[in-house]
Image: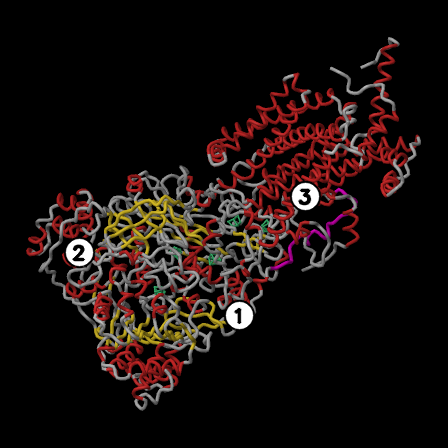
């Protein structure tokens, strides 16, 4: 009989967080010196969709076709959202706004706690992982994701007509699976790439350097709007950007936002819900007096 | 108020009447069984199709990843509450009038739990892997996630189901013995012999029986409350607008009792006619049930209003937007219908004359349950189609025919199980009705003799 | 790590307490203390198993004429993904979505895989020997002018072989046709600056005023310009963050990124340019000032629909912030006075003194025979006339699909039928290949050899396209190989040294290795290194722009009053991924939402909400768009970013053939364009067609990425996107 046993924080056995849980003894293979993070500069992003297509190419995303798209069953891990200024003008006097939305790899991910089988977990390098062969398709994770960036395999896309008709299946990336019906999937921060980079670094007996790994979306982006890297590496571009924008990971409100008159443009979406997202956006800038 | 039961029914007569229900019900019984079978067939067809094709045919999408399956799941879980819970509470309170109706109410519990369980399966994207959610030792030592309310749910439901079955079974043992002793030889007799566990009605057996029954009843009450509280946790523990409401557990429990009571009325009326139980399922008992239902309806109404008010005054913009959407958006007709059925229709139960009017109460009980089903739907869907993130809101969402088909089929499945049960197990507790008659006659005698204590 | 201290017996003890007890197993007498760390999922995703290593080969993107340098990722002999080559001065490691879909063009399930011969109503697969022999037969005894080649833009060694072959045939009929090309701007640039495509330095400008140049979307070299644009937007460059003003009647992707988007009455771009020149006042050469004098702000405002305040504001901005860059794009050039529009816009750029600052000359490249022959739409007109006269006996087509892209009014299909023998070198059985008598199946761009010189490149370079994998089908051939085989039919001895196009290409490089930076190197070493990089610097001399603004011949018509029967201007839009329709069979692109409307898998009619209200049209109404030349139907999309006098539809949809993803998807706007041409260059005036919109009574739910809210943040602004104005401090940004 052990009350302390009852009161144990069981999540600790399922989630490792590079932030906070530093030094957890079980992860010797991959010490928590990596926290992958991203920043997306909305002022640079033109809404061109190159990142989204790159993700299709890299991550074996199925093309669902018109009918399924119309049912809201598209599988784009990276979706480009287009917003208009809501100023009730007849004709916009500025352009639209674009927002590349992908899994925010929340450090306290609402999707993780609710999964009945622990198919979505936190990895020791700070990602929200998705274990396809463990998932039973309850979709609770998606229900609880505030950003709605989880995509469910409503059909068995590999065997669906015209998704990968021969010889299109030869394009599939063997570094990751093609998901079958009934499992959840979402952006992984291209984990096959981070994993390879990590292994290479390990083999060479060194730490990961900034630039060792690029996500497919980042790599394609013609305007370099996306930066990706290790937030724990002060030399990485991402870390510098977060630092410069005074955005901290484990905060539901940034100090700079409490102070009036800050002129920084880094922000995270739904920060106040406390998921601690790992993607920072940089506000679009518009010169209004032209 | 009239008598709950005539005090002059002979015990042998009771046996005869009830055992008759196992032999020759009214023809309507067969009609109901046939219709239920057809409905169930529709559901099975839809499920087979969905299993083959994938969940997409249910018309679910991003963000509407949950739909009627979850809503109907909660409905059936709720439905299950009144049976066992009321039976147990009333038992503890020595409310005699429960006796003729508790058996079928408990059966209702068991079968609606089983129906609810089906929806969990129907809902899963990979139902062939459902056992991943079960904590069992396996070669990889993978455990389910004990943090997930869905897991608590699975466990709570399983526990409730097993306990309810035990409660139902234990309470039926003396009756099985009666069946065993009275029914002509055949497979049924063998079955009853087995089920009666050698019941002889000895003193010792009765004493043990009473203790066991009481223990299980005591165990069931908190369990039942916890079950729907845990179902409420699926929502309340999430972070979604319209769901993370502190009052959800009591609200769900009230809703559960409510729909359960309404269902008891419906089934009361059906069984009374089909199995010719007019002598036992009497109007005064109906009246009591109706009054109880009305009381619960008011509790539910209160908690419902509390929920709206707390959302409204919390100034949680997003939750408020969901509430406004419920009242004005695509689902507004259903939301208003839910409020109408759930909070206005019960006032018909205040009319004394109507409390014992079979057609009116039949219609009212069906409306109440419609309202309760709508309540579950209105908890699930609007939060999905009008969640936090504006880009993915999908207010055009409508469930596909496959979803409707399975929901429809589930009513067939439930009815089928229930009807078959009533044909095999005495749906009125013979030994307890005898107790009731005995108590009544005792009371009458005492009154006649001018002694005190009659009630 | 998998320390298993929690044994089955413990478990069963725990389980013995029933379901809930398991969750609360601490209540039992059993401690599971030593097993608790096993509450971790050891089921690692298979994604963690990387079976082998990808190999990268450099090549050149063939998806559009920008010619970005790419690298293909190859595993187990299959090409999996295309990525930008970081060493490229064009795209610096980046790629657009269209380019990445190149793998889908390669693995496309609807490729033509065998030579096809059509005779009457029958089609049969034939051998290459027979195909080439048939061509030889058909050509025998024909005069040069009876034979013609219709191609898209060509450059590099294929261009050389093509020229050689035409020479051998004695034909001068090479028609380089591009359905959508900046041909008018090229001509106007040539007049204003002395070159067709000056080099732009967006990154050096403080202000960019673009008259409908969609340089981020589909214009000239979008990946290259996107990178410059990103620099232009950087707050930490010496010039500060640049300001983009986009003036156009239909919002393009570039317009969507503007600080100020100015909708202008269609066709009046030149007038606005002159109005700004007039308003500039100081610093304008006398003759220009004189020519601009009539363009008073009031008049210009009336003609263009742009407010006087805005005109003056823009003028002030240009005065205050120099250097700027003024660009004329397809939106301004697609009128019958398109050349005049472009000239006026170039004049504004010159007057502002930007020439030499944000714009300079491309280098003159030494190997003129390799430089691109760019296409235009005039070529198709000319060819069409020749065919109509029944003068052509054999027509080759390659890299074009005129049966799809020609407006109905040209009657191209009828005229094509007057050509007795048509050979299509094709990837798909597209509309043109369906009309051909002989279809020659081509290698995909990832299987074929080639070389190219992009029209727009920061530094002169010769790019190489090399096979990234074995041919998927045994019977497809490279275009170079086909031309070589045809040449060998005529001059076997001259080409006998070249077994195939590869050896020809290698020979050509190796022979010129001295000029290509390989002086003194071993042939093999030079070639291997060149192939490794898939590009070499071309020798060239610095060019110069003739900077003198001239107003000679400039005349801008006042706006055409809208005509009663056809009150709206149709502006066909060039989508960054569909372009002229050649990529319609790539499913990634069909499913990649249009950036502005977010529509997928279909075309649409953009209508301003005000205009739609007048016509009683709501979103999803199937409307008929009727011009003098025909009519098509599509779904209406209410779009604020369009001038109320105009409607817009994307090009590239509505194929009748080509493959499963293309066929029947949307409607083909090319069909209903009126036969109106730019007066100076003869180019099809693509924006000049007027239409009327009528409801058909049918309505659909548009399939698009944006939800029923139309991408609004629903009164809860700043959920997803937020805007900072100029108050932010960008100078210290990383
Ligand atoms: S964005 Fe959604 S899916 Fe991604 S980690 Fe956060 S909650 Fe989970
Ligand atoms: S869908 Fe899969 S990952 Fe998501 S909660 Fe259900 S089982 Fe877990
Ligand atoms: S990080 Fe990788 S998986 Fe995620 S959106 Fe980008 S390309 Fe896709
Ligand atoms: S590729 Fe870059 S610029 Fe294009 S949409 Fe994606 S983030 Fe924006
Ligand atoms: S711009 Fe053109 S050449 Fe460059 S990647 Fe895109 S399609 Fe290819």
Q: Main secondary structure of the magenta part?
A: loop
Specify few, some or many for label 2: CA neighbours under 10 Å numbering under 14, 14-19, or 20 or more. many
Quadrant in which residue B391 is drawn:
top left
Say if disc 3 is inside 8 Å of ligand 2: no
Q: Is residue C506 left or right of residue C10?
A: left
Specify few, some or many for label 1: CA neighbours under 10 Å numbering under 14, 14-19, or 20 or more. few
Tell which tag, 1 or 2, sits nearer the viewer.
2
Q: Quadrant of the C terminus of chain B?
A: top right
Query: Which chain is indicated by disc 1?
Result: A
| Element class at badge 3 | helix
Percent from the top left, x then y, of residue A20?
Answer: 56, 50
Tell me which segment is drawn in magenta.
Answer: C27-44
Percent from the top left, x then y, of residue C200?
Answer: 24, 62
CB-based contact (under 8 Å), mark 3 and mark 1: no
Percent from the top left, x then y, of residue C21?
Answer: 74, 43
Quadrant in which residue C142 is drawn:
bottom left
Q: Quadrant of the N terminus of chain B?
A: top right
Residue at image mark 1: A204
């Amino acid at each position: 009989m052990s009350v302390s046993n009852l009161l144990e924080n069981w999540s600790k056995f399922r989630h490792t967080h590079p932030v906070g849980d530093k030094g957890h003894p079980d992860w010797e293979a991959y010490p928590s010196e990596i926290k992958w993070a991203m920043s997306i500069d909305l002022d640079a992003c033109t809404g061109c969709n190159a990142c989204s297509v790159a993700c299709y190419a890299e991550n074996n995303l199925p093309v669902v076709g018109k009918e399924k798209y119309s049912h809201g069953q598209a599988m784009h891990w990276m979706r480009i959202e287009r917003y208009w200024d809501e100023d009730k003008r007849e004709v916009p006097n500025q352009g639209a706004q674009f927002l590349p939305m992908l899994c925010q790899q929340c450090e306290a991910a609402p999707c993780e706690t609710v999964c009945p089988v622990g198919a979505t977990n936190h990895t020791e390098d700070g990602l929200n992982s998705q274990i396809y062969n463990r998932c039973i398709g309850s979709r609770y994770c998606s229900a609880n994701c505030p950003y709605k960036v989880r995509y469910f395999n409503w059909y068995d896309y590999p065997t669906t007509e015209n998704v990968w008709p021969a010889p299109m299946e030869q394009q599939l990336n063997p570094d990751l699976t093609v998901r079958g019906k009934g499992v959840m999937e979402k952006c992984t921060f291209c984990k096959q790439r981070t994993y390879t980079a990590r292994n290479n670094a390990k083999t060479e007996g060194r730490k990961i350097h900034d630039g060792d790994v690029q996500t497919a979306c980042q790599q394609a982006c013609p305007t370099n709007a996306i930066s990706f890297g290790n937030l724990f590496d002060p030399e990485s571009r991402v870390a510098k950007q977060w630092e410069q924008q005074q955005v901290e990971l484990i905060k539901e409100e940034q100090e700079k936002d409490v102070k009036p008159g800050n002129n920084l443009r880094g922000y995270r979406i739904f920060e106040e819900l406390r998921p601690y997202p790992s993607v920072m956006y940089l506000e679009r800038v518009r010169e209004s007096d032209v | 108020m009239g008598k709950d039961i005539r005090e002059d029914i002979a015990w042998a007569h009771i046996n005869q009447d009830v055992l008759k229900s196992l032999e020759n019900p009214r023809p309507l019984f067969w009609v109901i069984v046939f219709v239920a079978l057809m409905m169930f067939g529709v559901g099975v067809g839809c499920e087979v199709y969905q299993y083959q094709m994938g969940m997409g045919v249910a018309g679910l999408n991003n963000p509407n990843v949950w739909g009627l399956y979850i809503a109907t799941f909660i409905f059936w879980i709720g439905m299950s509450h009144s049976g066992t819970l009321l039976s147990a509470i009333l038992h503890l309170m020595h409310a005699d009038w429960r006796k003729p109706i508790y058996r079928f109410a408990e059966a209702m519990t068991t079968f609606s739990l089983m129906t609810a369980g089906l929806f969990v399966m129907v809902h899963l994207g990979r139902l062939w892997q459902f056992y991943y959610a079960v904590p069992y030792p396996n070669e990889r030592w993978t455990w389910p996630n004990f943090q997930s309310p869905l897991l608590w749910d699975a466990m709570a439901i399983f526990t409730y189901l097993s306990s309810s079955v035990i409660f139902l079974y234990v309470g039926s043992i003396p009756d099985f013995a009666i069946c065993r002793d009275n029914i002509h030889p055949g497979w049924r007799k063998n079955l009853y012999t087995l089920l009666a566990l050698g019941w002889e009605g000895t003193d010792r057996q009765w004493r043990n029986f009473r203790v066991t029954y009481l223990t299980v009843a005591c165990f069931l009450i908190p369990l039942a409350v916890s079950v729907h509280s845990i179902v409420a946790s699926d929502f309340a523990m999430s972070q979604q607008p319209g769901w993370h409401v502190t009052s959800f557990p009591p609200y769900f429990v009230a809703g559960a009792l409510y729909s359960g009571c309404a269902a008891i009325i419906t089934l009361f009326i059906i069984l009374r006619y089909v199995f010719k139980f007019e002598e036992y399922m009497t109007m005064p008992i109906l009246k009591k049930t109706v009054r109880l239902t009305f009381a619960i309806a008011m509790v539910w109404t209160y908690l419902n209003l509390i929920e709206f008010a707390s959302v409204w005054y919390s100034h949680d913009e997003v939750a408020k937007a969901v509430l406004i959407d419920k009242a004005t958006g695509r689902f507004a007709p259903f939301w208003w219908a839910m409020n109408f059925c759930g909070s206005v229709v019960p006032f018909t139960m205040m009319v004394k004359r109507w409390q014992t009017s079979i057609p009116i109460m039949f219609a009212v009980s069906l409306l109440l349950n419609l309202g309760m089903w709508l309540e579950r739907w209105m908890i699930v869907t609007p939060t999905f189609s009008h969640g936090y993130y504006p880009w993915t809101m999908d207010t055009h969402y409508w469930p596909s025919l496959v979803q409707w088909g399975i929901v429809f089929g589930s009513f067939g499945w439930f009815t089928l199980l229930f009807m078959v049960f009533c044909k095999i197990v005495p749906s009125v507790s013979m030994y307890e009705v005898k107790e009731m008659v005995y108590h009544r006659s005792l009371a009458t005698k005492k009154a006649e003799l001018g002694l005190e204590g009659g009630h | 790590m998998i320390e298993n201290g929690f044994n089955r017996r413990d478990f069963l003890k725990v389980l013995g307490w029933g379901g809930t007890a398991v969750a609360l197993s601490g209540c039992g007498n059993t401690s599971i203390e030593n097993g608790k760390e096993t509450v971790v999922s050891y089921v690692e995703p298979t994604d963690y198993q990387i079976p082998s290593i990808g190999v990268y080969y450099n090549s050149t993107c063939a998806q559009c004429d920008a010619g970005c340098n790419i690298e293909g990722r190859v595993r187990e002999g299959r090409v999996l993904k295309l990525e930008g080559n970081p060493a490229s001065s064009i795209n610096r490691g980046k790629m657009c979505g269209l380019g990445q879909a190149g793998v889908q063009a390669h693995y496309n399930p609807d490729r033509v895989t065998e030579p096809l011969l059509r005779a009457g109503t029958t089609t049969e697969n034939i051998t290459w020997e027979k195909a080439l022999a048939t061509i030889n037969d058909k050509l025998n005894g024909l005069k040069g002018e009876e034979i013609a080649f219709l191609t898209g833009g060509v450059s590099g060694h294929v261009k050389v072989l093509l020229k050689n072959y035409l020479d051998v045939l004695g034909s001068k009929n090479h028609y380089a046709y591009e359905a959508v090309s900046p041909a008018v701007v090229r001509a106007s640039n040539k007049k204003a600056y002395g070159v067709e495509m000056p080099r732009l330095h967006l990154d050096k400008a403080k202000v960019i005023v673009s008259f409908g140049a969609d340089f981020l979307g589909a214009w000239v070299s979008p990946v290259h310009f996107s990178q410059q644009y990103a620099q232009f937007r950087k707050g930490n460059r010496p010039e500060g963050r640049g300001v983009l003003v986009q003036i156009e009647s239909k919002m393009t992707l570039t317009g969507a990124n503007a600080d100020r988007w100015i909708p202008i009455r269609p066709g009046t771009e030149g007038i606005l340019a002159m109005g700004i020149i007039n308003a500039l006042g100081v610093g304008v050469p006398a003759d220009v000032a004189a020519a601009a004098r009539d363009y008073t702000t009031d008049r210009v405002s009336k003609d263009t629909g742009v407010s006087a305040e805005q005109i003056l504001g823009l003028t002030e901005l240009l005065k205050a912030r120099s250097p700027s860059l003024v660009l004329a794009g397809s939106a301004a050039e697609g009128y019958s006075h398109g050349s005049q529009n472009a000239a006026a816009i170039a004049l504004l750029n010159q007057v502002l003194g930007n020439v030499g600052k944000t714009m300079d000359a491309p280098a003159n490249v030494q190997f003129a025979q390799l430089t691109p022959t760019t296409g235009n739409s005039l070529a198709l007109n000319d060819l069409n006339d020749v065919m109509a006269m029944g003068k052509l006996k054999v027509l080759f087509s390659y890299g074009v699909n005129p049966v799809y892209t020609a407006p109905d009014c040209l009657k191209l299909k009828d005229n094509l039928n007057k050509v007795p023998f048509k050979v299509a070198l094709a990837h798909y059985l597209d509309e043109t290949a369906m009309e051909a008598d002989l279809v020659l199946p081509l290698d995909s761009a990832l299987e074929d050899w080639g070389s190219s010189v992009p029209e727009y490149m920061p530094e002169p370079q010769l790019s190489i396209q090399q096979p990234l994998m074995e041919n998927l089908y045994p019977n497809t051939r490279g275009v170079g190989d086909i031309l070589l085989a045809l040449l060998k039919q005529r001059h076997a001895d001259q080409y006998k040294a070249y077994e195939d196009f590869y050896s020809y290409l290698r020979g050509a490089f190796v022979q010129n290795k001295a000029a290509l930076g390989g002086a003194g190197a071993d042939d093999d070493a030079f070639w291997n290194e060149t192939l490794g990089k898939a590009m070499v610097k071309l020798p060239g001399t610095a060019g110069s722009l003739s900077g003198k603004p001239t107003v000679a011949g400039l005349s801008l018509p006042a706006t055409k009053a809208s005509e009663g029967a056809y009150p709206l201007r149709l502006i066909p839009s060039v989508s960054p991924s569909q372009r002229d329709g050649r990529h319609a069979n790539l499913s990634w692109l069909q499913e990649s939402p249009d950036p502005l409307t977010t529509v997928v898998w279909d075309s649409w009619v953009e209508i301003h909400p005000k205009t739609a209200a007048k016509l009683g049209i709501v979103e999803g109404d199937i409307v008929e768009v009727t011009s003098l030349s025909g009519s098509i139907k599509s779904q209406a999309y209410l779009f604020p970013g369009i001038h109320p006098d105009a409607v817009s539809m994307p090009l590239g949809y509505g194929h009748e053939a080509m493959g499963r993803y293309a066929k029947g998807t949307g409607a083909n706007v090319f069909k209903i364009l009126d036969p109106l041409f730019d007066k100076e260059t003869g180019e099809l005036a693509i924006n000049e067609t007027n239409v009327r919109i009528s409801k058909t009574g049918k309505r659909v739910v548009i399939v698009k990425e944006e939800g029923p809210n139309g991408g609004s943040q629903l009164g809860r602004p700043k959920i997803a996107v937020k805007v900072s104005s100029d108050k932010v401090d960008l100078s210290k940004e990383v």
